[in-house]
Image (cartoon, rainbow, N blue to C red):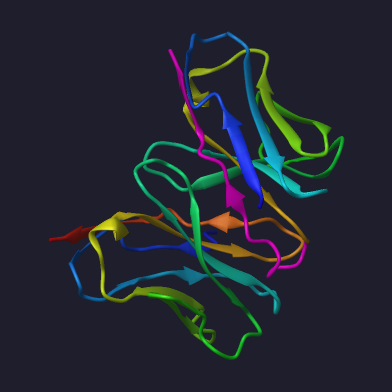
Amino acid sequence: SQTIHQWPATLVQPVGSPLSLECTVEGTSNPNLYWYRQAAGRGLQLLFYSVGIGQISSEVPQNLSASRPQDRQFILSSKKLLLSDSGFYLCAWSVGLGAGANVLTFGAGSRLTVL
Amino acid sequence: AQKITQTQPGMFVQEKEAVTLDCTYDTSDPSYGLFWYKQPSSGEMIFLIYQGSYDQQNATEGRYSLNFQKARKSANLVISASQLGDSAMYFCAMREPPRQLTFGSGTQLTVLP
């Protein structure tokens, strides 16, 4: 069966520090991978998605970046965190590209607090 | 413009009763998919139910059903026989291929004993 791992679960970082959140998927090949952010009490905002190794699409311009060094690994990074980067970050995966095939399965999330 | 609108920030329902969570959407694409997700306090997003724009029948999954009214562009989630464990945030979402999933702002459901 497929599983998705996301870490760290919680982190507190000072403004200006770097960030690295990691996500790995097991039990599937060539998944679509996604990073979403959820601000407190709000809906989910798509940050990045990837349909293959090295292929990254950015939905929202910001100081974050994403990389996909391996088929089932997706990394969210920042060189210098801002206060506004605080939030709940969710990694997700799916297979296929049609509307019906695009059921996203989410990880447990990473809660980031920037002080 | 909002693609997905959930007008109920919070809802209360008595245990064992049914509840409807509203969702309206905006699209001019003929092909799209509608999804509902549940987010408990733990934070993980759990897929509940899916409805395709060409599906003739309303989707059902156990106690969840999706009341799909295409002409009104609404995709309300109906939860029958509510349980205490249904208390959570519920998100409606839409995908218009090739664009990615867009989420509404959510409805916080509280089931009362």
**Nearer-the-camera pick, A96 or A46:** A96
Residue A5 occupies quadrant: top right
Residue depicted at 40% across the width and 55% down the height: B106
Q: Is residue A107 magenta?
A: yes
The residue at the point 72 percent across, 58 percent down is B99
**Quarter of the image that includes the C terminus of chain A:** top left
What's the residue at 53%, 87% (across, down)? B71
Q: Is residue A92 visible?
A: no
B2 and B91: which one is in front?
B91
* Spot occupied by residue A111 in the image (x, y as percentages of width and height): 46, 28
Query: x%, y% of residue B23?
Result: 43, 69
Q: Residue furthest bottom?
A: B56
Span highlighted in magenta in the image: A97-115
Q: Quadrant of residue B16?
A: bottom left
* Residue A42 visible to the viewer: yes
Give the residue at the far front of this rendering.
A1
Q: What residue appears at the point 54 percent right and 66 percent down from the top-left corner?
A: B35
The answer to which of B16 and B94 lies nearer the viewer is: B16
Q: As displayed, is residue B56 above or below residue A36?
A: below
The answer to which quarter of the image holds residue A19 is top right
Predominant SS of the magenta segment:
loop
Magenta stretch holds residue A69: no
The image shows residue B81, relative to residue B103, as above or below, that is below
Taking the image as shown, residue B83 lies to the left or right of residue A110, namely: left
Which percent across, then down, holds residue A21? Answer: 62, 25
